[in-house]
Image (cartoon, grey):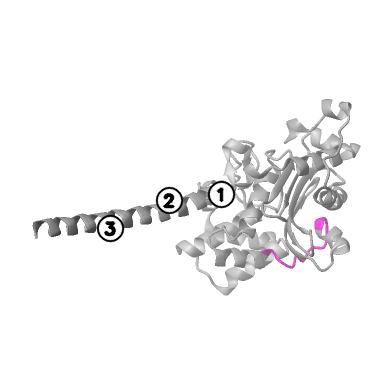
Amino acid sequence: MKIKINRGIHLCLLSLFLFALTVNASYATTQHAENDWPPLYHLVNPNLQSQLEYLVNSNARLKELVINKKLAIGIVDLNGKEPRFARVNGNKMMYAASLPKIAILLAAYESFEDGSLKEDREVHEDLAAMIRHSSNDAATRMIDRIGMRKINAVLKNSKYEFYDAKHGGGLWVGKRYAKKGTRHPDPLNGISHGASVTQICRFYYLLSEKRLVSPSRSEQMLQNLSDPALNHKFVYSLDRLAPDAKLYRKSGTWRKWHSDSILVQGNRWRNYILTAMVESSDGEAILKSIVLLAEKAIKAKDIPRISHKDKQNNLSKQL
């Protein structure tokens, strides 16, 4: 009898031990899967990067702007099992005018979730006007509702790190979109409304993967970014190249600073993120041309041959 009891205890303990191992293994697998989800920083693709550099090097005007750090371009090809990322001046933070309003959009949905912002018709109307029509009045009302400190806390939060000192800064909103208001420039570069193409690409990448706030909130933000009302820059070119494609977009313009960002969902290979910022009097025309350049880079299959001269003057320092 004593032997049977001990054996029963041993069997019970063994069962509990095996159950604990199963639970821990399952938890570890889940954590491993989450941690292994590839951040965009790790997805730079040599072929796409070479194509982008080759095409920029082939255009004297674009090359000059990139070398002088007045043009930045980011591409994420979403076709295939793993995204392909390429960039020039990727971590260069530039004045981006209205493009950082996407940061206000994110902070609004974070505030809906934590209960600090009331979700009502008027707020949603302002979000739509701020993104689709780039209304400065609507953006200023949203900043006043949420608070600038909260917006930039969301951007710096380890959950997103859209403003990251280790990568040159990134998205930042440091002033109301109005004449009146205190200016709070970003700590690294002193820019009031700034962005880098790497962080913009990360924003759209996470959004396309439904990883901003929550899957349902990501869907709502995509709806805010859909059907852009301003037909210029990237949208102008895509309306001619792919009129049936679905576009999710935010742009910005102020004087000689021009920026654009877009998630394109079309037929076959046309599934990508594109962003660019340029400081130039002919910036809008340059951004229109960037769409065709990006699509050439995405479609190209072979790594281009680069001359010895281009190797000596390549864009590797501009990445």
Residue 196 seen anywhere in this rendered image of the structure: no
Residue 54 visible? The answer is yes
Q: Is residue 129 above or below residue 10?
A: below
The answer to whether the residue labelled 3 contacts the one labelled 1, judged by CB atoms less than 8 Å apart, is no
Residue 40: percent from the left, percent from the top?
63, 46
Q: Position of residue 268 (x, y in %)?
A: 79, 62
Give percent across and percent down for residue 319.
Answer: 72, 36
Q: Amino acid at mark 3?
A: Ser
Q: Which of marks 2 and 3 precedes in the sequence?
A: 3
Mark 3 and mark 2: Cα distance apart in space: 20 Å
Mark 3 lies on residue: 15
Q: Nearer the viewer, mark 3 or mark 2?
A: 3
Q: Which residue is mark 1?
A: 155
- Magenta span contains residue 259: no
Image point 86% across, 30% down: which residue?
310
Marks 2/1: CA–CA distance: 29 Å
Q: On screen, 122 above or below 204?
A: below
Which amino acid type is marked by label 1? Answer: Leu
What residue type is disc 2 on? Ala
Mark with earlier residue (3, 1): 3
Q: Which residue is mark 2?
A: 28
Nearest to the observer: residue 266 or residue 301: 301
Say what secondary structure mark 1 lies in. Answer: helix
How crowded is the residue under tag 1: few (<14 C-alpha within 10 Å), some, or many (20+)? many
Report the magenta residues as a range: 225-234
Q: Earlier in the sequence, mark 2 or mark 1?
A: 2
- Classified by dominant secondary structure, the portion drawn in magenta counts as loop
Along the line of sight, which residue is nearer the eye, 50 or 75?
A: 50
Q: Position of residue 68 (x, y in %)?
A: 80, 33
